[in-house]
């Protein structure tokens, strides 16, 4: 039986085409501060797209997004504007 490798090794095999003109994730920073959503987003994102800042704002590295939509499902209403990347952009899974 072949070894599958670690999760980070398998994730590194994916290919990303980053849309430099239009991010598919936007954070309403006022809503993020008001709801303290940053730590929740950090905790649920397997790709570590979100980084909570001391002032309550949230940094986003959309290029690492696996497009699973978990963040959108758990974020307090109004914090995220999320959609799939435009055609031809986003992640191409190579390991299932």
Image: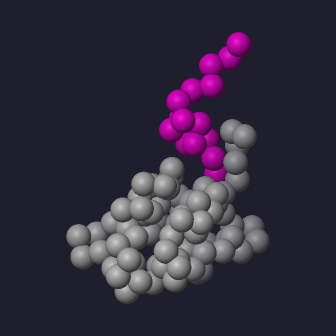
Q: Is residue 52 left or right of residue 79?
A: left
Percent across and percent down for residue 96 are 72, 40
Does residue 38 sit above or below 92 in this rendering? below
Start-end of magenta stretch: 1-18
Residue at 53 percent of width and 79 percent of height: 77
Percent across and percent down for residue 30 are 37, 86
Q: Is 7 colored magenta in this rendering?
A: yes
Q: Can the viewer see residue 6? A: yes
Residue at 36 percent of width and 62 percent of height: 39
Does residue 77 sit above or below 74 in this rendering? below
Q: Is 9 colored magenta in this rendering?
A: yes
Which sits in the foreground, 85 or 18?
A: 85
* Quadrant hosting residue 57: bottom left
Residue placed furthest toward the bottom: 30
Residue at 75 percent of width and 67 percent of height: 88
Percent across and percent down for residue 10 are 59, 36
Does residue 76 sit above or below 42 in this rendering? below
Residue placed furthest toward the right: 87
Residue at 63 percent of width and 25 percent of height: 4
Q: Can the viewer see residue 59? A: no
Colour scheme shown: one colour
Q: Quadrant of the N terminus?
A: top right
Q: Is residue 29 left or right of residue 76?
A: left
Does residue 43 sit above or below 69 in this rendering? above
Residue placed furthest toward the top: 1
Percent across and percent down for residue 20 are 56, 75
């Amino acid at each position: 039986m072949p070894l599958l490798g670690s999760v980070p090794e398998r994730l590194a095999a994916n290919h990303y085409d980053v849309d430099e003109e239009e991010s598919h994730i936007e954070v309403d920073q006022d809503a993020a501060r008001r709801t303290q959503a940053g730590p929740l987003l950090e905790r649920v994102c397997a790709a570590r797209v979100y980084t909570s800042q001391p002032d309550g704002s949230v940094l986003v590295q959309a290029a690492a997004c696996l497009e699973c939509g978990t963040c959108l499902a758990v974020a307090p209403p109004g914090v995220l504007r999320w959609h799939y990347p435009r055609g031809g952009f986003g992640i191409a899974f190579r390991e299932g």
